[in-house]
């Protein structure tokens, strides 16, 4: 999302420092104005998302009336259902109805599960959230130090190995890597549990509360369940984490190289500060700020990657729900989940944008 | 000034000097010269050359599929004796559940992959260029509206949007191409807009305008060619992504339909036999991996060679 705020030129007067109270006030005002601009562009983007899903729903070659009544129903039934669905009204009015429905949380009913889409989504979302979050944690925990190492030893064999590792992460199809992982670590080595979230033995004896099973089992002190859940989640999380690791590592490397070429680093070196300290205390701190955006983006990529990963690992999350609905031409469910993923995407962007504004003094000052 | 086609005896060193000339005598010489310099820079990078080899290899394999693997990729051998055979001298990659030779299918699948990539690039690049240059050149409300639309398309994760489009249009390779193209253009538009903004106030643009050139002519004749190099690099970097998305769609059963030898769909078939007959899924997946790695290496090298700003 673009920053649409205009910095007033007078705020940049460097001659004399403004009084403390005034500067805080202008700063808050500027921040609020930035937030206002963001909110506006957010609203427009969300409206656009709705238009896109609405239009996709309208170009379906399947006649929605026929899919409800079957092709043997008399013409009068056809007309009635046609009118009930609102298909006889003008496009704009149809969109207005759609908008009102969506805003009140009504995405329609799933053709497959015969339940409201929103209930279905609420049921499957925690599974995806748990998987993607663990993947992100792994990706950041491994990717960021690797990126730092690659930048610190630029051009050496360490850099080369890390580069190849990242390229493999970029290039391998995630569904294939998942299958190979299952083959090696589940079928051959037996290190991890197979598809699914939880073993059958534990499924009925354990009552999850939030739907995030690792958290639930730990809170309830059921460590046997925790171990079982962990052995299920670790392989898909590692596969997902590998992809975000590749991205995060590469971006960290490039940000670090940028920082290490700055003059303040030269100055620090001249002062005789150790290279370790320069890298970890000076350069990394500055490189960490743009990393927020990168981490946000890779979280979004994880949601996307989870569609394919969940199919492989029979993970009962949003991705599997989406693919199941797709394969059964359950359009309401497809559009509902697409919309939800789009909204999550926009919100993550917004959060990382706001964090960026709060943490980067240059953006904060509005220059 | 030398004539553009002055007759001279052909020698490699003469050709080289002509290409590297500091004062090109013609537009063609300048253009070829800059290509040659890019090539020289690219040649320094061994990884990029590996990538180039993979990409050229893919094109050759696609062109010569019938020569390399003369068998029929769609019809298998006798089901009783040749079903799910492990890799051997007769079947380099084994056979699948229809007793078809997987090597033959992978080779023929190269055609489909190349087709998808080419079609997506041919559709998405002009759209992105048109939208981006128009938005950047005119600015104002045109820019605001076009970029808002671009942002909305960017607000969906790529695979998800492609999935939704394919769900609406129906599965099939043409629809997969349309869906991927629809999700690819916004990035190119963004890039083209940024490039246009940096050159739209240049003197040569003003000169062209003063000579009475129409906006369309300035856009296509002067602005778009200058945006092209960075967009091309981006497209090359993106090709691996296109291949992966297409394979992902195929894997989910929404791309090419069986019995077409599409790599993603082949992996999906092999999923059922993954534990006992691993090669059915592993081999086509390996092909996807190698090809997308090749495009990534080449794209990386191109960026380093042609775009010194990004070469870090």
Image (cartoon, rainbow, N blue to C red):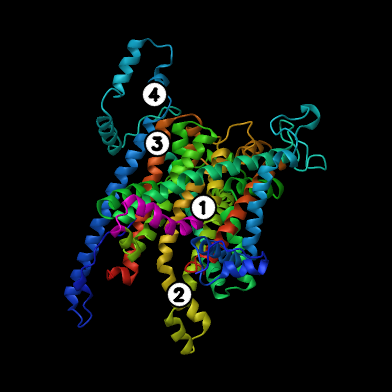
Is A331 rendered above or below residue B42?
above
Give the magenta range.
B209-234
Q: Disc 3 versus disc 2: distance between alpha carbons? A: 43 Å
The mark that comes first in sequence, 4 or 2, is 4
> Which-is-in-front pick, marks 1 and 3?
1
Contact between labelled residues 4 and 1, with CB atoms less than 8 Å apart:
no
Q: Disc 3, disc 2: CB below 8 Å?
A: no
Left or right for B210, reference A152: left
**Do discs 1 and 3 share a chain?**
no
Q: Which residue is mark 4?
A: A64
Label 2 CA crowd tier, 10 Å (few <14, some 14–19, many 20+): some
In three-dimensional space, the C-alpha distance between marks 1 and 4, rounded to whole angstroms, equals 36 Å
Residue A248 at x, y percent in the picture: 50, 62
Relative to residue A123, is residue A148 depicted above or below? below
Mark 2 = which residue?
Answer: A259
For disc 3, the marked residue is: A335
């Amino acid at each position: 999302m673009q920053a649409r705020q205009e910095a007033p030129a007078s705020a940049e007067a460097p001659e004399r420092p403004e009084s403390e109270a005034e500067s805080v006030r202008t700063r808050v005002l500027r921040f609020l104005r930035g937030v206002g601009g963001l909110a506006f562009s957010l609203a427009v983007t969300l409206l656009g998302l709705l238009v896109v899903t609405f239009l996709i729903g309208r170009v379906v070659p399947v006649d929605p009336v026929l899919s409800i009544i079957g092709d043997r129903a008399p013409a009068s039934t056809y007309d009635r259902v046609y009118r009930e669905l609102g298909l006889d009204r003008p496009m704009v009015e149809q969109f207005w109805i759609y908008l009102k429905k969506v805003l009140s949380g009504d995405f329609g009913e799933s053709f497959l599960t015969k339940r409201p889409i929103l209930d279905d989504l609420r049921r499957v979302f925690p599974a995806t959230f748990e998987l993607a979050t663990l993947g992100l944690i792994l990706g950041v925990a491994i990717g960021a130090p690797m990126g730092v190492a690659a930048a610190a030893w630029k051009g050496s064999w360490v850099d080369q190995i890390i580069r190849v590792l990242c390229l493999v992460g970029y290039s391998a199809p995630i569904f294939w890597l998942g299958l190979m992982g299952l083959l090696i670590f589940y079928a051959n080595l037996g290190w991890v549990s197979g598809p699914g979230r939880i073993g059958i033995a534990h499924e009925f004896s354990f009552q999850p509360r939030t739907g995030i099973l690792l958290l639930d089992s730990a809170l309830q002190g059921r460590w046997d369940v925790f171990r079982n859940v962990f052995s299920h989640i670790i392989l898909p999380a590692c596969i997902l984490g590998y992809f975000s690791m590749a991205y995060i590592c590469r971006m960290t490397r490039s940000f670090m190289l940028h920082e290490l070429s700055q003059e303040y680093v030269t100055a620090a070196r001249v002062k005789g500060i150790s290279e370790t300290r320069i890298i970890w205390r000076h350069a990394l701190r500055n490189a960490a700020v743009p990393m927020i955006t990168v981490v946000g983006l890779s979280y979004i990529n994880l949601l996307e990657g989870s569609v394919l990963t969940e199919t492989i690992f029979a993970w009962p999350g949003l991705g599997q729900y989406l693919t199941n609905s797709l394969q059964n031409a359950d359009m309401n469910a497809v559009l509902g989940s697409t919309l939800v993923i789009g909204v999550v995407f926009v919100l993550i962007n917004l959060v990382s944008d706001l964090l960026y504004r709060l943490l980067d003094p240059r953006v904060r000052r509005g220059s | 000034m030398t004539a553009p086609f002055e007759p001279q005896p052909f020698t490699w060193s003469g050709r080289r000097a002509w290409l590297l000339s500091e004062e090109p005598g013609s537009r063609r010489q300048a253009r070829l010269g800059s290509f040659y310099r890019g090539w020289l820079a690219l040649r320094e990078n061994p990884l990029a050359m590996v990538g180039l080899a993979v990409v050229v290899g893919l094109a050759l394999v696609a062109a010569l599929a019938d020569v390399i693997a003369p068998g029929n990729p769609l019809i298998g051998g006798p089901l009783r004796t040749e079903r799910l055979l492990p890799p051997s001298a007769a079947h380099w990659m084994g056979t699948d559940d229809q007793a078809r030779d997987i090597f033959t299918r992978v080779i023929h699948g190269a055609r489909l992959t190349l087709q998808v990539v080419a079609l997506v690039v041919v559709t998405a690049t002009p759209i992105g260029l048109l939208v981006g240059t128009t938005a950047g050149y005119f600015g104002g409300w045109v820019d605001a509206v076009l970029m808002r639309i671009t942002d909305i398309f960017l607000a969906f994760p790529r695979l998800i949007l492609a999935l939704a489009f394919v769900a609406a249009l129906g599965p099939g390779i043409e629809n997969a191409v349309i869906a991927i193209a629809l999700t690819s253009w916004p990035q190119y538009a963004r890039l083209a807009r940024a490039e246009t903004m940096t050159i739209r106030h240049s003197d040569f643009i003003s000169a062209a305008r003063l000579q009475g050139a129409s906006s369309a002519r300035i856009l296509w004749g002067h602005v778009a060619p200058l945006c092209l190099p960075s967009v091309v690099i981006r497209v090359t970097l993106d090709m691996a992504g296109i291949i992966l998305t297409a394979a992902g769609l195929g894997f989910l059963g929404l791309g090419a339909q069986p019995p077409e030898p599409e790599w993603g769909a082949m992996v999906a078939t092999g999923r059922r036999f993954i534990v006992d007959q691993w090669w059915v899924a592993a081999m086509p997946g390996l092909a996807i991996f190698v090809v997308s790695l090749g495009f990534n290496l080449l794209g990386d090298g191109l960026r380093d060679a042609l775009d010194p700003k990004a070469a870090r």
